Amino acid sequence: MEKRVRSPNYPSMSLAEAIQRAALVYKNQHTHGAPREVVAKSMGYNSLNGASATSISALIKYGLLEGRGDEIKISDRAMCILHPQSPEEKAEAIRQAAREPELFRDLAERFPGRMPAEDVLRNYLIRNGFAPAAVSSVILAYRETCEFAEREAGAYDSGPVPVSTEAPAMHSTPQSHSTAPAPNTGKPVYNQSDERNVARYDFEGGGFVRISVGGPIETEQALSMAETLIGLKRAEIEARNERARNTLPSDANSSDESEYDA
């Protein structure tokens, strides 16, 4: 009998992004329960729609939100991450959140230790009935979450996670880990640990191209900006090549004329 192809039940975002959205929920409704419509607006959405419902579902899968009906609220685990009593409490909460999604827990048990190559994960998921079109998104969310948990769980700052008053797609201002105070420029300041990978392509020779994002930026918004930056860079290269072409003929002609006169 042919195996049924199924869509993977996994969080639509990485754990790092989910924590930032949980921080927004806490800022706007604290620990009080509320209907999904209110939770969606707390996260910066205008209404409860496909995108906001998917985000709420992701936070529930990580155990950052709990409850049902009119009582969706921030969880104790989220509070341990946002306002921990010790760095150890935050580290443990992050590890638990990273393993909470059933699919991520299964992958971690199937591939303990260092994460395998993407092709290995892809083949495993497809062999277990996942739709090939969805596998790339699964791997990206899982890889980002593992990298974040590995990076943050051991030495995560014990201070509260700062919250932006902007919508989820806007930058928030994570706390700086530097010993010297950051200059007050009015712009968001990010640490390298706040970055997450959005896309990566590995070349056979060992090189790679990677798109990374700092802060709670929507993946679609990040890709759109990447396209804009690529377009600007192409225009810059073309302008530079054009200047080179405009200067080359005169030099070449003078060289040709000198040889002819000689």
Image: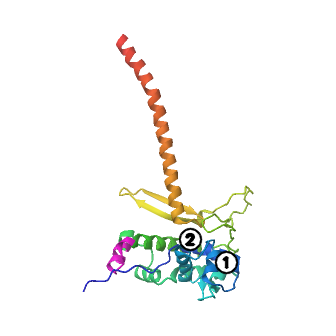
Q: Is residue 9 visible?
A: yes
Residue drawn where x is 36% and y is 72% of the image: 122
Residue drawn where x is 53% and y is 80% of the image: 57
Q: Quadrant of the N terminus?
A: bottom left
> In front of the other: label 2 or label 1?
1
As displayed, is residue 89 above or below residue 150? below
Q: Which residue is mark 1?
A: 82
**In terms of secondary structure, where does tag 1 sit?**
helix
Snapshot quadrant of residue 167: bottom right
**In terms of secondary structure, where does tag 2 sit?**
helix
Q: Which residue is mark 2?
A: 151
Specify whether residue 131 is painted magenta: yes
Q: Which residues are magenta?
A: 121-133
Query: Residue 110 location in percent, x, y?
Result: 40, 81
Label located before the other in sequence (2 or 1):
1
Of residue 102 and residue 107, the one placed in the foreground of this image is 102
Residue drawn where x is 60% and y is 86% of the image: 66
Callout 1 amino acid: Leu
- Crowd around label 1: few <14 · some 14–19 · many ≥20 (10 Å): many
Tell me how many marks there are.
Answer: 2
The alpha-carbon separation of the residues under discs 2 and 1 comes to: 17 Å
Q: Is residue 74 visible?
A: no
